[in-house]
Amino acid sequence: MLSPHTKIQERATETGSALVYILIAIALLAALTFSFMEPSSQQSSAQNTFKTVSAAQGQVDIIRSAIQECVLLYPNGDSTIAQAGYNKPYPLNPDSTHLPVAGSYRAADKKVANIRCPGDNDGSADQHKKIFSGAGGKFMPPPPDLFMDWQYYNGTDGVFYWIETDKSDAYVKAALQKMDDNFGECEADFIDASGGAIDLDSDTTISCPLGRLCFRVWMIIKPSASAVHQDAGCP
């Protein structure tokens, strides 16, 4: 017959063993939970990257098609435009001084939503109609999540439009790099200005600001653009 002291020792041993098993079970559960969470996080990032690429790519195509339609329908453009560096018959910069202030033809910014089609006029030659408007049946969708509005350039280096973001989410940079891979050489470029502002034109009138990521799509590239294009050997 076991003494009371021996029984107490056995119970303590059993309790200790049970506690060990409980701790092992907790550790295994934690490891299992982590193994499920990590792929889930990676999957979420991949989904966000895909969503961003799809949204941005769709808008790239909308803008390109709208501009090309203007050029095809009005190949003679506006013969009164005499601005240095202008590429005929593509739309002027939305804030161009050629566009009259009266009637709100001249915008206060360079947003793609405000570009106008030379040759498609309300009255005089400089009264270009907006490409994206209810009257024309074309609408510029909101920019992709975390991005600012698309902007437009027509000048010394050619014709391009670009988008930018000041967000540091890892999937945003991954999305822009993926988009760059989807375009042909010299057709588009990814600009990382996290280390300092980067000029987008050789006349230094526009830039990708400090701390931002930009993505630019070219429609025309002039020789002077070699100084500002991010891909070697372009144009």
Image (tube, grey):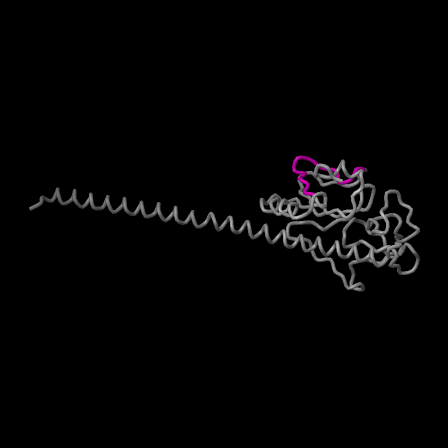
Write down the quadrant of residue 124 in the picture. Answer: bottom right
Write down the quadrant of residue 130 in the picture. Answer: bottom right
Q: Residue at x 88, y 59 (%)?
A: 121
Q: Can you give x and y, in whole percent of width and height, for residue 214 in the image?
A: 69, 44
Q: Nearer the viewer, residue 150 or 17?
A: 150
In the displayed image of the protein, which residue is found farthest to the left? 1
Q: Residue at x 77, y 41 (%)?
A: 206
Judge from the rendering whether residue 23 lies leftward or rightward of residue 62; answer left or right. left
Residue numbers of the magenta segment: 189-202
In the rendered view, would you say 97 is above or below 128?
Answer: above
In the rendered view, would you say 141 is above or below 148?
Answer: below
Q: Can you give x and y, in whole percent of width and height, for residue 81 in the image?
A: 91, 49
Q: Is residue 105 magenta?
A: no
Judge from the rendering whether residue 214 lies leftward or rightward of residue 102; answer left or right. left
Q: Split into 4 quadrants, where in the image is the C terminus?
A: top right
Judge from the rendering whether residue 11 lies leftward or rightward of residue 156; answer left or right. left
Q: Residue at x 56, y 53 (%)?
A: 47
Counting every numbered tag in the picture gives 0
Q: Can you give x and y, in whole percent of width and height, for residue 28 in the image?
A: 35, 47
Q: Is residue 192 magenta?
A: yes
Q: Residue at x 88, y 51 (%)?
A: 99
Q: Can you give x and y, in whole percent of width and height, for residue 163 in the image?
A: 70, 48
